[in-house]
Amino acid sequence: MVIPPPVRPARITKYLKPYLLRMHFSNKFVSAQVVHTPTATVACSASSQEKILRPSMESTRDVAAAAKIGKLLGERLLLNGIPAVSVFLKREQKYHGKVKAVIDSLRDAGVKLL
């Protein structure tokens, strides 16, 4: 069963920032994805669970892994033609540690943060 994305009225979608960065940190893995907010679909994603990254990483859950995920996500965003991303941190997330590593490596990859 396929659930279609929500249909939002034009008065709402014209004020939405087009792309939003979402990060998730578990005890084992780091993942980040960019969501296209008007259609509520994932535009691009990267995770430390990917088979391509596993041999080159010592750990899949530390700050170095988060930095690698941010760099990979930045490269994929630029390949897909997405130059800018909005970042909204949750209340419990501070600009420190893994969150800082992902955001800084995105910025270093050439993605503009709104």
Image (tube, grey):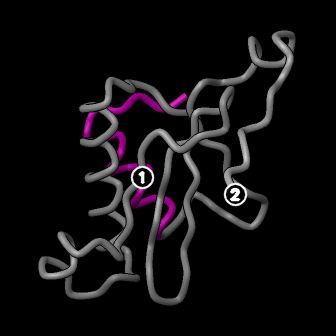
State yes or no: residue 1 in magenta: no
Q: Quadrant of residue 20?
A: top right
Magenta segment main secondary structure: helix
Q: Are marks 2 and 1 in contact (CB under 8 Å)?
A: no
Q: Is residue 23 left or right of residue 82?
A: right
Q: Which residue is mark 1?
A: 45
Q: Amino acid at mark 1?
A: Ser
Residue 87: x %, y % from top left: 59, 41
Q: Which residues are magenta?
A: 98-114
**Rendered position, 46 above or below 40:** below
Residue 19: x %, y % from top left: 56, 31
Report the number of numbered marks: 2
Residue depicted at 38% across the width and 66% down the height: 47
Q: Quadrant of residue 75?
A: top left
Residue depicted at 72% across the width and 41% down the height: 4
State yes or no: residue 102 in magenta: yes
- Secondary structure beneath label 2: loop
Task: Pick out the residue farthest to the front.
Answer: 1
Q: Which residue is mark 2?
A: 1
Q: Is residue 22 left or right of residue 78?
A: right
10 Å crowding of disc 2: few (<14), some (14-19), many (20+): few
- The foreground one among 76 and 8 is 8
The quarter in which the C terminus is drawn is top right
Residue 66: x %, y % from top left: 37, 67
**Rendered position, 111 above or below 61:** above
Q: Amino acid at mark 2?
A: Met
Residue depicted at 39% across the width and 26% down the height: 82
